Amino acid sequence: MDERPYDIVLFGASGFTGELTARYLARAAAPGARWALAGRNPAKLERLGIDAPILRADATDPASLAELARRTRVVASTVGPYVVHGEPLVAACAEAGTHYLDLTGESEFVDRMYLRHHERAVMSGAKLVHACGFDSIPYDLGVLYTVGLLPEGVPLKVSGFLRGNGRPSGGTLASALSVLGRAGPAARAGALRRAAEPRPPGRRVSSLPGGLRYVGGWALPMPTLDPLIVGYSARLLDRYGPDFTYRQHYAVRTLPAAVATVAGAGAFAALAQVPPVRARVQARLKPGEGPSAERRARSWFKVTFLGEGGGERVITEVAGGDPGYDETAKMFAESALCLAFDDVPERAGQLTTAAAMGRPLIERLHRAGVTFTGRT
């Protein structure tokens, strides 16, 4: 891959998160890094005014995606919803031995890509790494960081608690509506993957949304992609011990806030099942639109982890600024830079950020302002 003209190509930079990622790369890429922007409308990318080569590639044109994959070592895609637009690029990267990153929060897409392209990626040497933004880096790498502070070779139990605020972009809203409207296909894809994916011999992994708990505040179930990603990491990495359990929660301080959060999530999920209502909800915030810089500057997140094992107990925290956009762009860009330039594990196939990059990515993010801290 050293003979390819580009180290990194960002596909989909004209969207809200894509533009933030492109501007971050323009600041953070080291001199000599060969990176480019790609999309179906080069004129739109040129209007961003970013000093980078511009390539044409279209999610509906597999030949253009195959050519794109052959020209770079890493492709980072922001073009979602991925279950609709993402597979042709994954297929092209798996075939070409090109590392692939995305921002998906869609479990159906992750499971389908494993079933269809994992084996080819293992053969070609490609790393296919999903969920490289707020879904699911703080949780995946936060658990890896926590496990590293606990004893080896013993059963481990980790619980994660998210606090924070932030507002969605149109693209995120579209992806969320797609996920909620496809619960049946997602469940079927998950069942097929569980039947096909080998289990680690002699080890047990359980990773689920947490139950309702009171821990000085209310901890609510968090049925997102993140616990699944943590579980995939635990199955890939022996360091998680012979018996690993993870539970994830959303934390609020008061009972009224807990009731309002559950009611709001339930109403949103119900609306997503009705296509005309789903379309009206999407129309309120279109893809390409998102919160202002001022609003993002007031946003923040903290994920606290409680880890236990071998008679020891640790508390760790991953924290940063605006979770959905500024920090997601940072996490995504640093993931691409890490895959392109850092000394990462040799394994290939569909991986997680913990298994594909692990400690080098934690160190990159910590230097960039996403803090990882721990205490016993």
Image: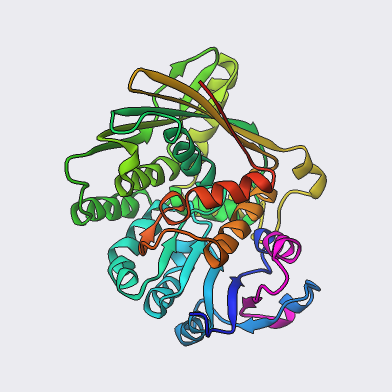
Q: Is residue 126 left or right of residue 286?
A: left
- Name the colour scheme: rainbow
Q: Is residue 217 placed above or below 221 in the rendered structure?
A: above
* Residue at image coords 59%, 15%: 254
Q: Is residue 352 left or right of residue 33?
A: left
Membership of 337 in magenta stretch: no
Q: Position of residue 213 (x, y in %)?
A: 44, 17
Q: Is residue 154 left or right of residue 368?
A: left
Does any portion of residue 78 appear in the rendered image? Answer: no
* Residue at image coords 61%, 70%: 10
Membership of 22 in magenta stretch: yes
Nearer-the-camera pick, 35 or 165? 35
Q: Is residue 304 placed above or below 142 in the rendered structure?
A: above
Nearer-the-camera pick, 340 or 324? 340
Across the whole image, how many numbered discs are drawn on residues? 0
The range drawn in magenta is 19-44
Toward which corner of the image does residue 97 lie, by quadrant? bottom left
Q: Position of residue 330 (x, y in %)?
A: 66, 53
Q: Position of residue 199 (x, y in %)?
A: 21, 48
* Residue at image coords 49%, 56%: 104
Q: Position of residue 173 (x, y in %)?
A: 58, 51
Does any portion of residue 79 appear in the rendered image? Answer: yes
